[in-house]
Image (cartoon, grey):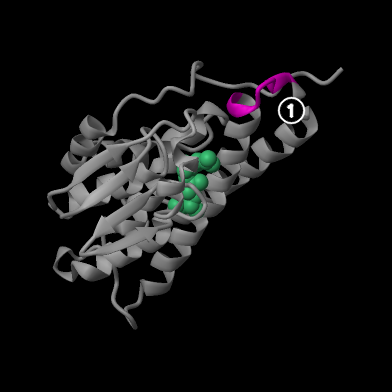
Amino acid sequence: MITLHHVAFSRSFRVLWLLEELGLEFDVKTYSIRDGSLRDPAFLAISPGGRVPALQIDGQMLFESGAIVQWLCEQYPKAGLIPGVGAPERAAFLEMLGFAETMASLIENLNLSHIFLRDPAQASPTVLKLTTARLGATLAGLEARLGAQEYLLSTGFSGADAMMGFNLFAAPYYVKMDPFPQLRAYGERLEARPAFQAARARDGEQDFYTQDFYSIPETT
Ligand SMILES: N[C@@H](CCC(=O)N[C@@H](CS)C(=O)NCC(=O)O)C(=O)O
């Protein structure tokens, strides 16, 4: 019995998608980010920071998307979604798990400032500008790193793509993707995967972004 604790269009999508890639059967328990349910003591007992994803599997409860992605890929080695210890691209896989969170933490800060602050006008335009530039720099770095490669690893699709891929669907709310043609093509490649489509069908509708793009407010 596998249960994913999930918020629509959040980092728990990474695990939802990976579970589909692995062809596993699982239940999804969906939460709202706004109604306090992630701060309920019952949920905090599952995920101490009150964050999703959390995954109940084989009698264990796991949290942190990077750890869950690595654990699942290692638990189901026949799927070939992780280079083994000593394999040439093992380090690149681990780097990409971490880099995905470097990028996601910038998106999270922008979400907090633009969307979740009670009065978004209170957000510092200087900090917004800096955070947006830092997000753009991570995208530029990823664009250069990916080059003409189809997926993050030269060996093909891996758990690192499920980890990173989610960011590419959230970053465009804050950064124009025109300067990143490789990332746009990569995002389309990811979206075309049957497991991605199956995960999208189970994801649910996000209820926090109300605009297609959030600009940095003008400083006076
Ligand atoms: N590093 C954690 C971050 C998880 C995280 O912050 N998830 C967000 C959704 S994207 C969340 O649960 N936010 C709820 C909150 O901050 O209250 C991971 O990768 O699992």
User: Residue at horizontal 28%, vertical 67%?
Assistant: 82
120 in the magenta segment: yes
- Relative to 75, is 142 on the left or the right? right
Residue 200, x across and y down, in percent: 26, 33
In this view of the protein, which residue sits in the foreground, 157 or 51? 51
Disc 1 packing (10 Å; few <14; some 14–19; many ≥20): some
Choose top left, top right, bottom left or bottom right for residue 131.
top right
In this view of the protein, which residue sits in the foreground, 199 or 141? 199
In this view of the protein, which residue sits in the foreground, 60 or 193? 60
Residue extent of the magenta highlight: 115-121
Q: Tell whether circle 1 marks a residue whose Cβ is less than 8 angstroms from ligand 1.
A: no
Name the residue beneath numbered marker 1: 123
- The residue lying furthest to the right in this view is 220
23 in the magenta segment: no
User: Residue at horizontal 20%, vertical 41%?
Assistant: 193
**Residue 35 seen anywhere in this rendered image of the structure:** yes
- Relative to 83, is 144 on the left or the right? right
Choose top left, top right, bottom left or bottom right for residue 132.
top right
Quarter placement of the C terminus: top right
Question: Looking at numbered disc 1 in the image, what kind of residue is underneath it?
Answer: Ala
Report how many numbered discs are placed on residues in the image: 1
Q: Element at badge 1?
A: loop
Residue 153, x across and y down, in percent: 34, 61
Q: Is residue 174 above or below residue 161?
A: above
**Residue 182 seen anywhere in this rendered image of the structure:** no
